[in-house]
Image (tube, helix red, strand yellow):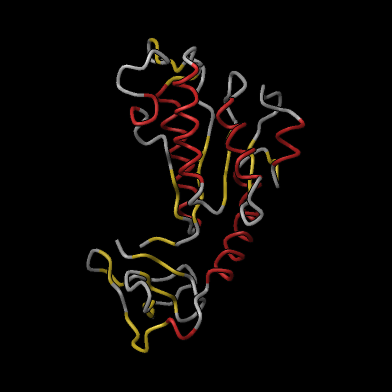
Amino acid sequence: MKSNVIVYSALPMSGRKIEVVKEQACLNELFLRNMGFEVINPYRNLKLIIGENDTTVQEGMIQRSTDELTGREIIRMCLKSILSADILVVDYRGATEVSQGCMAEIAWIYLFENKHTIVIMDKGNPNTHDFVSGMADHVLTNFEEAKPILSDLLDHYIASKTPASQDLSIHSYMPHVNGNPFYCSCGANIFRKLKSDPAVFVCNACGLQYRGI
């Protein structure tokens, strides 16, 4: 089961090894999922982003595309996915050059008042710029620093997405996952379903929502 508070997890690709990008993306996804977020990780299958035979990949390294159409299509694909997210987390650590894609993602989500951006940036990063610090809600050096902020945002979105009581079923459930009782992050294990979307379980104790998969 997953929470319905969604994070789009972004990081720069240009000038970096494919396997390094994928590993960093998966570690970030794990961290965020353990906090209770649902995560969009666009780097799980990089071939879906850069294509099977894309010339932006040379000897295992992702190069900045010299094909303007290819570059725009990659950014457009990512921006469409961001629309479904509540929070954008951009992890610039390890970047070797300025990331046009991450800049576009930060600018895009800035247009929406109900979305937030958290940037993780190490010292001396080539993406250090007033544009980034001006557009992001928070700029931090690592995920541990970001954890309390992310936790507050999780609570904020849970509260804003809590359904009206009339949308909750009158029956309670004790769901199981792989044969084991499922517990909410608050420790409770009694849930009700949404009438409008029976695949969504709502914790009776704290209101956190999970979607059955």
Q: Is residue 46 above or below residue 69?
A: below
Quadrant of the snapshot with the C terminus: bottom left
Image quarter of residue 62: top left
- Residue drawn at (55%, 29%), measured in percent from left and top? 101
Q: Position of residue 210 (x, y in %)?
A: 40, 66
Q: Is residue 35 left or right of residue 129?
A: left
Tell me where residue 46 sits by quadrant.
top left
Q: Is residue 49 above or below residue 63?
A: below
Question: Split into 4 quadrants, where in the image is the N terminus?
Answer: bottom left
Q: Position of residue 119 (x, y in %)?
A: 64, 40
- Residue found farthest to the left: 179
Name the foreground residue: 1 vs 23: 1
Farthest residue to the front: give it: 69
The residue lying toward the viewer, choosing from 14 and 104, is 104
Q: Could you tell me residue 141's position as x and y percent?
A: 67, 38
Residue at x 44% of width, y 76% of height: 203
Query: What is the x, y in percent for residue 90?
Result: 58, 38
Count all numbered tags in the image, as a single digit.
0
Classify residue 30 as left or right of residue 138: left
